[in-house]
Image (tube, rainbow, N blue to C red):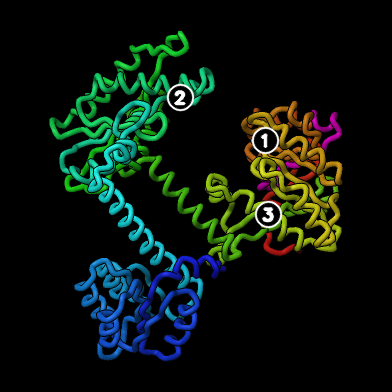
Amino acid sequence: MYDGKKLRELCKDFTVLLVDDEDGAREQIYNILILIFKEVFTAKNGKDALSIYKENSIDLIITDITMPVMGGFELLDLVREINQSQKVIVMSAHTEIDMIIQAIRLSVDGYILKPIEANQTFEAIEKAVSNIKLELENIAYQKSLEDKVNSQEKLLIQQLEYDSLTGLPNKEKLYLEFKENASDYSDMIMLNIDNFSQINATYGYLDGDLAIKQIGIFLEEIVTDNLYRGNGDEFIILVKHQDSNKAIDLATKIKNKVYAKRFEISSTLIRITFSIGIVTIPKNETVLPYAKAQVALSDARKLHKNAIGYYTEDSHTKNYQQEMNEWAHKVKLALDFDLLVPYYQPIVDAKTGIVSKYESLARIVEQDEAISPLYFIEPARIAGMATDITRRMILKSFEKFSSTDIGFSINITDDDFKEEYLIDYLQENCKKFDIKPSQVVLEVLENISDYDASHAISQIDKLRTLGFKIAIDDFGAESSNFARVQKLQVDYIKIDGSFIKDIVFNENSLIIVKTIIYYAKHSGLKTVAEYVHNEETYILVKELGIDFVQGYFLSKPLKEIE
């Protein structure tokens, strides 16, 4: 659901013109708009709307396409003759491709399908008004800069456009100069110091600043093109048109010279290397290719330190970033519109063949398709939504098993421990849904010991004291070790599925699984085999002495519990 208060705050200073020949639809939308906009004008056709538009200050137009007297597209053509940047959202019950193409040609700012659906309407309005507000802020910002120049506030301009540490033009100056002289440049080079955080950690931030200053001087001696200080340990070069190899020749020269150079910090001589990204600036380009240069630099860093990367449209980093952004957006929508739900996979007692408990697995339901967390959990973690997913899974799983004796497990991430909400949140929902802590197994993911995990261990101890069971998930993968199991005092070891899937024909996997089982049995721990996908694997893990099994051979995750 959209936050009405937030949307009202966004739209309260703006006016809107609503154009629709259908009285019922117009009244329905008007009743929504009048609650959030400063002023709402209405018209039944394009001709009346144009008259209103000419006589009033209109920030946003929301118009139907098909209307008598004058349609929406004709209205939009005439409005754009008056104000080319006018923000417009069109409404239509038509989904024909020619309608959509016409809307795209006219650069509309939103498209609402009839019959009107509230969330779709709010989303289109929020996007359009945010763009209006952003443009006004940009105009205000540019005017502010112009006013400062006109007032000859040279000192302030110096502070705004030049880095105080190196004296080099800064990122703001970079954007301004590119905007004014974009056609002068053929390439952009981005330099980033490798492992600079280690220099700060080892020598301190004052010496880190000294290193940045020395590096700036070093680069000024080499670079004859426009050199800038970017964010942190980043330097940027705009290469002027010359021969086609100028950028790569300059980047190679910097790479070789910096490797041979020694910089003095705290009476110690240290070597510094750069990761370097190069992006060619297309002819008539008006937007600084800053993000593309970062992509090229990231590609270089994936190779090794002191490497040079080149931006391409099929860059792995670019595609990865785009995919992460798309999935993060899907997770946000899933949380907002309650599309993230638990599916329940049975965990079977290997001795009896009876379902012992269920694992609650997060799924995003989209057009009747249940999407696995393999696609969205990492983007959610990067975007800071991992704990939102855990909270939602706890809430819905507890509700599902409310007032029953059925056991179930929930995955817990390192982010959940860092936020330190779990103990109170679990206790609160146990009370709310009449769940006994002993019913709940918390499956702790491996990454809690990638660094000092004392923040997690103390919480796990408390949760165990309260009666919750602890399982260590994906054991055997990445940084798994038996010392961690001993330190966490877990109740279950869930063996990583990569070993179970090929255990029948992979001798190494078999040896690893046998070792884990041997340790578990002699430590009083229960074992769970995941990804049991066929009968042969099922028979083998039972023979090895596994306590519990789960996988598609027994049952896929279920929307409802049998």
Residue 147, compared with residue 35, is above or below; it is above
Q: Nearer the viewer, residue 414 or 133?
A: 133
Can you tell which quarter of the image residue 218 is in?
top left
Of callouts 3 and 2, the N-terminal one: 2
- What residue type is disc 2 on? Phe
Residue 423 appears at what percent x and percent y? 77, 47
Q: Residues within 10 Å of mark 1 (few under 14, many from 20)?
A: many
Of callouts 1 and 3, the N-terminal one: 3
Residue 422, compared with residue 512, is above or below; it is below
Of callouts 2 and 1, the N-terminal one: 2
Residue drawn at 19 percent across, 73 percent down: 81
Residue 262 appears at what percent x and percent y? 37, 11
SS for dot 3: helix
C-alpha gap between disc 3 and disc 2 = 37 Å
- Placement of the N terminus among the 4 image quadrants: bottom right
Instruction: Tell me if label 1 and label 3 are in contact, CB under 8 Å.
Output: no
Residue drawn at 33 percent across, 72 percent down: 88
* Disc 3 target residue: 391
Q: Nearer the viewer, residue 488 or 2?
A: 2
Residue 248 belongs to magenta span: no
